[in-house]
Image (cartoon, rainbow, N blue to C red):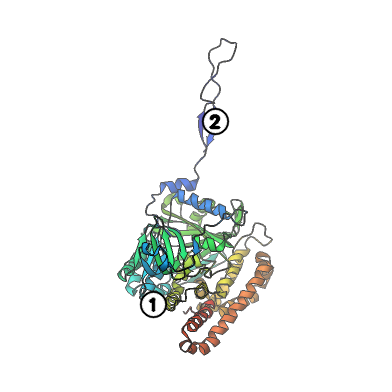
Amino acid sequence: MSLLRLQPINGISQLSVGTSFPQKKRPLLLRPQAVPSRTQRIMESVSVSGEVGGAGGAYSYEALKRLDNLWSSICSSQEVVQEPQQVVSTVPGLFGSSGLADKAEGSYDVLVCGGTLGIFVATALCTRGLRVAIVERNVLKGREQEWNISTKELLELVEVGVLEEDDIERATAVKFNPNRCGFERKGDIWVNDILNLGVSPEKLIEIVKTRFISLGGVIFEQCSVSCINVYEDAAVLKLSGDKILSSRLIIDAMGNFSPIVKQIRGGRKPDGVCLVVGTCARGFKTNSSSDVIFSSSSVKKVGDSKAQLFWEAFPAGSGPLDRTTYMFTYVEPQPGSPKLEELLEEYWDLMPEYQGVSLDNLEILRIIYGIFPTYRESPLPASFNRVLQFGDASGIQSPVSFGGFGSLTRHLGRLSAGIHEAINGDYLDSYNLSLLNPYMPNLSASWLFQRAMSAKKQSNVPADFINELLYTNFSCMQRLGDPVLRPFLQDVVQFGPLSKTLGLVMLTNPQILPSIFKQVGVPVLLDWSRHFLGLGYYTFLSTFADPVLRPLVHTLPSKMSFQLKRHLEAWKYGAGLDYKL
């Protein structure tokens, strides 16, 4: 019901001229007052505390509106929304000979900007004996909302010395099985031990933070990056408040919206975005399994655009009746794209039917939302000497995932070893640093899946095409077994499994092929074919050329050895062959 407020004109009444009638008031006009949306009412009724940095770390309605405004600016019809701030500058000469050298409050081997995920690479480098400091604009702590992940990925943190095995149990808030993939009443596919742990970021980051400090690491909290000056012998970080820190290398771990990344990409729009909304709520009586990906409807209109909505859900560690439920969609950033608040309005309508509960019977603990941009030109090669992107800032996460913690664990051993070697050998120019974020055809090949899962405003394919395509793919992967299905569910694309899946799809459902061409377009398919061939080529190189070339690593000069190792890693990781069942 609309709320109306009575408003007299000018606040006064007037007497008619030339009459002796009693003073007569002019009629009051009704001026409507904006009615809070259901999302605003619900969010303002939920207690908000402990907002932290990083994706998904804010929960308030004000933060939602700020993010929606940012998203609207990204969707603007202008190619460049605004001139990006010039954060990094190259300064000729030696820092040691400059007048600023005496003002530096600390000198390190590595400075990591952004602590939420940067704490992991910082700790890995500390275990290798480097002097490392972290700069974090907030207090360095994890959010309350759990990350869902597999045991295999956490063991990768143990392998690089960031965690002890006992720490996994301490940080794990909840375990659940089985895990479902389903698409609009076409049938369900069940797997076990895939993304089946709910890890508390609060506990995990506290464990890693304690280890980092015990290894001699330093943390500068509530410090914002002002600018970075790159000299011939050092990278100098200026913080708000005129504090100066120097290091041999600066790692940018400030995420998708890093100001350094904005400068490098020149304000260019993302090629695709995953929009995510959801809740952690109490009151679910059926709460033992999870949904890895589930679709309960065909393409539908949200706001002024069309969207294919997907779900992910899993038990929360805060209580036996607590459950996290995400709704997400893939879009191209353009005018009219759905806003997060519009998606939340849709969420309140659809989630109760999806989960078989009444909204009135749930206690909303947290409301979660985020935008995750991805670029075709990823991972992002180094654009400056002594500055390297890491994690989501580097674009190394899959374009079909939201949040890069899984890709971080997968690449952490490779990256920490390479960074350590680059610092010891002083290979800190942009060319050698770019070898740490190389072209990876399996990542680029994933773009076809993102585009295939994105609804178009104008489309001549059936409304249920996306669900039909996904169910066909997942069914074929299930028939081919764990060596095909499990890597894909953990965002690892490999040439052999992908080839087998595509072949089986064409054999079992050939009539779907014309719709694929209509949905993604011939130019996208041609571009994807190039990366698919690259995936096969890297698989060949890693399988057959690597064993021949690897013995040379120990016989070549230091810099050539460093570069050869990076090429061998690029072949292996770019082909997805680092993933073992």
Residue identifier under label 1: 159
Quarter location, residue 131 = bottom left
Alpha-carbon distance for marks 1 and 2? 68 Å
Numbered circles on residues, count = 2
Secondary element under disc 1, as helix, strand or loop, is: helix
Please name which of the two marks, 1 or 2, marks the residue nearer to the observer. 1
| Residue drawn at point x = 33 percent, y = 74 percent | 164
Front-lying residue, 576 or 469:
576
Quarter location, residue 153 = bottom left
Q: Is residue 380 visible?
A: yes
- Mark sitting earlier along the chain (1/2): 2
Residue extending farthest left: 214
Above or below, comparing residue 303 to residue 105 in the picture: above
**In the image, residue 76 lies at what x, y percent?**
60, 53
Residue 185 badge: none
Q: Amino acid at mark 1?
A: Glu
Is 103 left or right of 370, judged from the image as shown?
left
Residue identifier under label 2: 30
Q: Amino acid at mark 2?
A: Leu
Density class for disc 1 (Cα within 10 Å; few <14, some 14-19, many ≥20) is some
Above or below, comparing residue 336 to residue 132 in the picture: above
Front-lying residue, 468 or 404:
404
Secondary element under disc 2, as helix, strand or loop, is: strand
Dots 1 and 2: beta carbons under 8 Å?
Answer: no
**In the image, residue 496 lies at what x, y percent?**
57, 80
Density class for disc 2 (Cα within 10 Å; few <14, some 14-19, many ≥20) is few
**In the image, residue 348 lies at what x, y percent?**
50, 51
Above or below, comparing residue 142 to residue 4 in the picture: below
Residue extending farthest top: 20
